[in-house]
Image: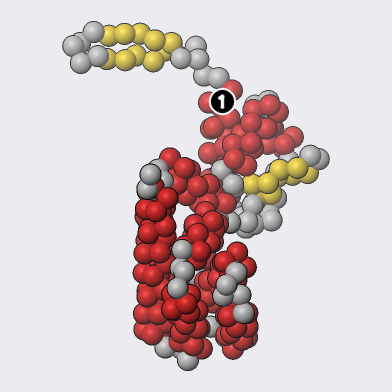
Amino acid sequence: MPIISTILPLGHEVMSTVKLNRATLAEQVADALIERIEADGLKPGDPLPSINRLVDEFGVSKPIIREALRTLEGRELIVTSNGRAPIVKPISGDSLRLFFERAVIIDGESMIELLEIRRGLEIQSVTLAARKRTDDEVAEMRSVVMEMRSHLYDPNEYAELDLKLHFLIASASRNTLMLYLIQSIRDVLRSTIKEGLRSRLSEAQIRRVQELHEAVVDAVATQDAPAAGSAMAAHFDDAIDAIYRSMLQRAEP
């Protein structure tokens, strides 16, 4: 049993015993498997060795190997299933979404901070999309924004179409990591976006929401990156202001 010695500031030495347990061994195996995934250049869908083979390689028991694999699965690195070798998991925004969800639950004010983060991401996303989009992507964006026009007074449906449009723009940016970031934040803000739309009561406010979305798509279509970024910035400035006012109204006694 290993002995860990702790030295206190006053010079008193306290001896404590720490037993290396299965969790410690499992973490070591998990770290070694991560190094193997990187060293071997394994891609999403590629298999790891079977449990029996890993047992032989590491010289540990099956329970320890299974615990190591559960650790990697919890980190969203692999997928396991009964009777099959574990495989490398495709990258997704799930872990980011869980992080943002927890941040908002712990501190409600972080909702505005999250919107401010998304604002910067969306401006960069649409700037890239204006330079890299295809004609087919523009056609799909125009189809969605026209459908949005027919649902101006239906906040729930409009919000879903709004999210779809922003996802199309992020896809057209050809930046996969940005796409995951935007998608993870978008999912957390879904209900807040709907609330912000409901808070726009005047005809002019409602029309402005649609006009800014159409301006964004028009700028992407003409590959005018500065105009696309400006239109997206104006859209998010309005959205953040509307959601902030809605939050203040809810907080009033």
The furthest residue to the left: 10
* Residue found 53% across the figure and 75% down from its top: 169
* Residue found 53% across the figure and 39% down from its top: 31
The furthest residue to the front: 253
Answer yes or no: is residue 196 visible. Answer: yes
* Residue found 54% across the figure and 56% down from its top: 191
Q: Is 10 above or below relative to 41?
A: above
The percent coordinates of residue 177 (x first, y second) are 50, 63
Label 1 belongs to which residue?
A: 23
In which quadrant will I find the C terminus?
top left
Query: Residue 65 is drawn in which quadrant?
Result: top right
The percent coordinates of residue 223 (x first, y second) are 46, 88
Q: How is the image coloured?
A: secondary structure
* Residue found 56% across the figure and 25% down from its top: 23
Task: Name the element at disc 1.
Answer: helix
Crowdedness of circle 1 by 10 Å Cα count: few (<14), some, many (20+)?
A: few
The number of numbered badges drawn on the structure is 1
166 or 214, which is in the foreground? Answer: 214
120 or 171, which is in the foreground? Answer: 120
54 or 109, which is in the foreground? Answer: 109
Amino acid bearing label 1: Ala
The furthest residue to the right: 83
Answer yes or no: is residue 137 visible. Answer: no
The percent coordinates of residue 102 (x first, y second) are 48, 43
